[in-house]
């Protein structure tokens, strides 16, 4: 019977962490589709809620792993896990850790891109609000035929 974290290996939940991180990547891809206008916008709150649940699950798994590392006298972080993997990890542990790291990097990049999409949508919405509130210069188009409605000092790169 295991009574403390010190009797577990820090790698015991790597497979679970990989599965949860893959779920995060999948939900971030779904979010990106919705933010890009390829889907039902009303689904965005559901996706955000699911993303929050997944992140909480990931945090719990990482916290447990960090506690085990600390109980072994290692730094309770990804650096500490890398040290443990380098010294004691089986081949499968090393492979899972690498795959988990790669998925985490993919999730980080997807999240960054989704943030840019949210920013773009907010700028478009602000521009529409400005027009509706009469904050435009009375005309939608300038003498060059281009839209005169601007939401910032630079045009948006849409496409």
Image (spheres, rainbow, N blue to C red):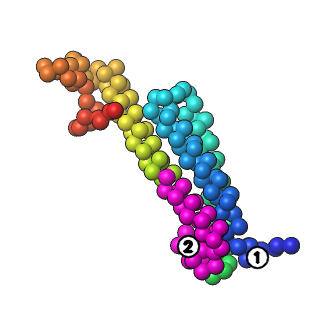
The answer to whether residue 152 is above or below residue 23 is above
Instruction: Please tell me which residue is depicted at 44% across the width and 33% down the height of the picture.
Output: 36
The x, y position of residue 77, in whole percent, is 56, 70
Quarter of the figure with residue 114 = top left
Q: Residue 148: where, in percent of width, then height?
A: 21, 24
Horizontal side, residue 25 vs residue 8: left or right: left
Which residue is the extreme one toward the top? 139
Q: Quadrant of the N terminus?
A: bottom right
Residue 69 location (% of width, % of height): 64, 75
Residue labelled with disc 1? 7
Q: Is residue 100 magenta?
A: yes
> How busy is the neighbourhood of tag 2: few (under 14 within 10 Å), some, or many (20 plus)?
some
Which mark is drawn over residue 70? none
| Circle 2: element type | helix
Q: What's the CA distance linking mark 1 and mark 2?
A: 19 Å
Contact between marks 1 and 2 (CB within 8 A): the answer is: no
At 47% from the left and 47% from the top, the residue drawn is 110
Of all residues, the one furthest to the left in this rendering is 143
Q: To which quarter of the image does residue 27 belong?
A: top right
Number of marks in picture: 2
The residue wearing badge 2 is: 82
Tell me where the magenta segment starts and ends, as one range.
77-106
> Do we see residue 18 in this rendering?
yes
Seen at 37% across and 36% down, the residue is 120
For the stretch drawn in magenta, the main secondary structure is helix
In this rendering, the label closer to the viewer, 1 or 2: 2
The image quarter in which residue 44 lies: top right
Residue positioned 40% across, 33% down in the render: 121
Find residue 41 and report its horizontal and vertical position in percent.
52, 28
Q: Earlier in the sequence, mark 1 or mark 2?
A: 1
């Amino acid at each position: 019977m295991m009574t403390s974290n010190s009797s577990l290996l820090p790698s015991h939940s790597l497979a679970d962490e990989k599965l949860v991180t893959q779920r995060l990547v999948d939900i971030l891809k779904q979010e990106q589709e919705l933010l890009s206008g390829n889907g039902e916008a009303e689904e965005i709150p559901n996706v955000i809620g699911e993303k929050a649940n997944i992140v909480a699950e990931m945090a719990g798994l990482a916290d447990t792993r960090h506690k085990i590392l600390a109980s072994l006298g290692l730094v309770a972080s990804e650096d500490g896990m890398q040290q443990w993997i380098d010294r004691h990890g089986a081949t499968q542990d090393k492979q899972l850790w690498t795959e988990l790291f790669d998925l985490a990097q993919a999730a980080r990049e997807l999240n960054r891109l989704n943030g840019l999409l949210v920013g773009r949508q907010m700028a478009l919405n602000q521009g529409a609000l400005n027009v509706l509130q009469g904050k435009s210069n009375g005309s939608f188009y300038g003498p060059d035929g281009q839209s005169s409605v601007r939401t910032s000092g630079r045009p948006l790169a849409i496409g």
